[in-house]
Amino acid sequence: MAFCRVVFPLLVLSVISCYASKVPVFMWGESIKSSVKANPLTTYTSEEFSAAVEQVVLPGTLTLVFIEPRLSVEDLSQKNSNGETSFPYLHDNIDDAVYLPNVKNALKALNRTAGASAVHIYVTEESPDVLGLSKLDDGNFIFIHLNDAREGESREEMLRRHDDFMHATMGDLPDELTAVGIYTANYPSWTIPASKSRPRRAVEENSAKSRMYTTDGLRMLAKAVKVVSDTVVLTIGAFTDVLYPDEEVFALVDFSYRCAQHISFSSRNETKTYTVDFEDLKVQPFFETNTTQEFGDSFNCVGFFSAPIWAGLFVVFILLSITFYGIMMMMDIRTMDRFDDPKGKTITINAAE
């Protein structure tokens, strides 16, 4: 009993830690003076993040927390086809910012730090404007929930619109007011599902009724083949069934069948269906007259006049036409004899000259 009292709380804590959301946090402002540096290999806990917020948010500072429903590091770093980022305002303030790429339960830490001074404002599509920011007292934490996704709008466009909204909101604050902006989210937008599997070691009750055999690179040799039409006889224990191919399987004599990458033989029983699938099948019968036991040339069910063959014949015909036309042009060449005198002496040129 005492052992269960110890194990159960540990199990609960482990489950809670597995479901803890890890999101990026971007804090900027002119009054930020913190020694916290971004480290992509470090995960900040809620306590460590609260300590970092206390270093950034000085007493008498208005803190605006812009909260996305979902946000990840990939959203902050990705660019569109033109090489433009969705956060030009945040990139312009990177020198006066503290960026923590991996924070566990960031909003819980911010709410705990804000305490009773927290004010929550929900921005929706119907009311996109945040009113009354200039009337709030210094030292407040204003949580602005950006829940204004629009129909037909891409995620890049929505993030760019939120960047413009943060720029306009921070710019509308009075100059004498010291403000710090924090950009984070409730949950990460990019998650990698973890696949978990457990092999079953218990024998099923009806395991003899359903069998599955998987082999890679199998080569089967049969001493005798009984050909009954083009079917395959499947025998499992005392049960025998005839399987029919989904498409015709044939090949020429001394050729091996290699037409389709996937061949299925299935039964036509109305109660149960048995299917035998062959991937990358190559089959050839060898008769008593065969002296070799090697596969012959592959028969791919392609006719003698396929598209590549017709294309080759067409190219050869064009080349022959060009050659014939060139020969005809060469035979049509005539010498220029209009300057010769037909009544004069014939001009002869000896080889010695």
Image (spheres, helix red, strand yellow):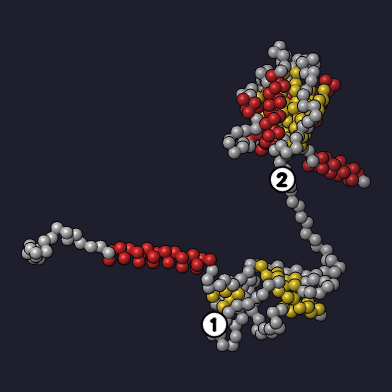
The residue indicated by pointer 2 is: 192
Identify the secondary structure beneath mark 2.
loop
How many numbered marks, from 0 up?
A: 2
Q: Is residue 125 left or right of residue 304?
A: right
Q: Where in the figure is residue 48, as x and y percent of width and height?
A: 74, 29
In depth, the one of 346 and 279 nearer the eye is 346
Q: In which quarter of the image is residue 247?
A: bottom right
Q: Which residue corresponds to the image point at 78% horizontal and 23% vertical from the top-left?
A: 130
| Horizontal side, residue 116 vs residue 350: left or right | right
Q: Distance between the residues labelled 2 and 1?
A: 54 Å
For this view, does 17 lie left or right of residue 346? right
Q: Position of residue 340 (x, y in %)?
A: 13, 60
Residue drawn at point x = 66 percent, y = 85 percent: 224
The quadrant in which the C terminus is found is: bottom left
Per the image, the residue denoted by label 1 is: 292
Crowding near the residue tagged with mark 1, few <14, some 14–19, many ≥20 C-alpha atoms within 10 Å? few
Task: Name the quadrant containing residue 128.
Answer: top right
